[in-house]
Amino acid sequence: MQCSQPPAITDNQLSAALDGEAGLDVLDHLAGCTSCAARYAEARTLEATLKRHLHRFGCPPTEEIADFHWGLLDADAAAAVVQHLPICPRCSAELAELRYFLTDDQAEQPQLQRGAALHRPSPRSIQARVLPSQQAVALRGAAVEPTIAEAEGHTIVLQLRKEGDHGMALVGQLLANPTELWQVALVEVRQEGIVQHVAALDQFGGFKCYLPSQQPVDLRFSAKGKPDILISSLSLPATGG
Amino acid sequence: MTSAAQASNDDLARYCAEETEKFYRKLLSDSQYCLELFRRALVDELSEALTYVYRIYERQTLVWVQRHGRFDKTGESPEYFALLALNNFYFALRGEQFHRFPSLSHLLSYLKTCVNTAIVQYLRDQKPQQTLPLSPLHASDPDPQLTEAHIGEVWARICELVPDANEQLLARCAFLLDMKPRHIVAAYPQRWSSVREVSVALYAIRQTLRHDKVLRALLGPGDLADEVNG
């Protein structure tokens, strides 16, 4: 294909265009010449492909930069960060940003914030699907079928029990797949936006907490580095007494 | 008041909340109750104590999120980052790590650090968008996902092609960090004195990479190979 408006754009001009430094004459030429526009698109494809795959390659995670600031890294990890910072303006900027953020230590009365938006869908969380009751599996000793929810291969079993003087006990278990990725995990239970219970799951993925009422519950299961699993506005029938 | 160590969890939480309110009103406050509450939550791993920590400090964490300079760029709710920060604070400081923070102010600074980490890492994870394929023939080709090892090979190849230390730094700034020439000059004024100098050097690097068949093969088949082969 030949340039329709010779002379053709030079490779140097194309390189400048990739950096957003092209003059208006170059941009006009690219708009009007199919051949040069194709060359530019080719160069842009390579550029975009490299940037997409190499994005922050070799940079320590933000948490590691923070732990470096706090002196929490071992000697080797700290040395690696020290070596990395001079060749990485982005990581250096993140460290400076953290230090600036921490110096802003004015005491301020927090405006009351409710957890109303806790369970707004986020790309980083998985909304569990509550299964119809006929698909539930009875827990040993349970008089009423528990509620089962499913989230991308994980199963959550929940039951609400009346326990005399203690009130309403919510008992649950997260059956994660694979189990080892959720060995250190938290469950958070809210009612009407108020935190009712936060606890680490036990070795079997289980938890138990007492609730002040039978209001619908919002649950969130969190493990480090994993998307949260959410169950929103779940009404549970109570069993026992 | 009872001493912190002797107080029940409920009393401890109440005292902590009261002392926290005093702090916000710039009155003299006693940090022992909140410190003991954190200890019970993170070292003894008492769920009751952990619940109270979340209840008492969620508000402050939300404020920190909303005051972070880059929070608005995320498009997420403040609650998302506040809870992420609290969770990561727990994961990081549970057990023996807690003892590396000798005071309440240190603990709260670390919690604030977790807010920063949550937001900054979120933004960092927003990779540059995929360029649409140029050819209709490849319009349906999925964006190939490279493994970490594979990406390492790509970068290693680029370093082979560009062995000069200055040029490698330039390649790193341009392709790994997506920095514009003017920002590269601002970051390294002792190495490059003008945008023109950076642009000329980048042009040469791009020419080298563009004609390397090994690099093109590492980046995968499809529209890239076809277009670059032209």
Image (cartoon, coloured by chain):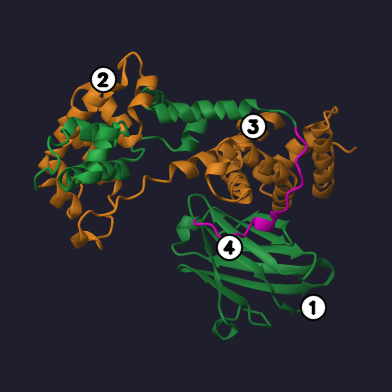
Chain colours: A green, B orange
State the quadrant of the N terminus of chain B: top right
How would you classify the magenta stretch by its main secondary structure?
loop
Asked if badges 1 and 2 are on one and the same chain, I answer no
Which mark identifies residue A241? Answer: 1
Question: Is residue B159 in view?
Answer: no
Q: Where is mark 2, residue-wise?
A: B197
Foreground: A72 or B153? B153
- Residue mark closest to the camera, 2 vs 3: 2
On screen, residue B165 versus residue A107, left or right, reads left
Q: Residue at x 36, y 45 (%)?
A: B128
Q: If you read the primary sequence from the N terminus, does the residue marked by circle 1 or circle 4 appear first?
A: 4
Q: CA distance from mark 2 to mark 3?
A: 43 Å
| Helix, strand or loop status at disc 4 | strand
Query: Amino acid under label 4?
Result: Leu
Q: Amino acid at mark 3?
A: Ser
Q: Chain of mark 1?
A: A
Q: Residue at x 62, y 76 (%)?
A: A147
Q: Which residue is mark 4?
A: A230
Q: Residue furthest right?
A: B1
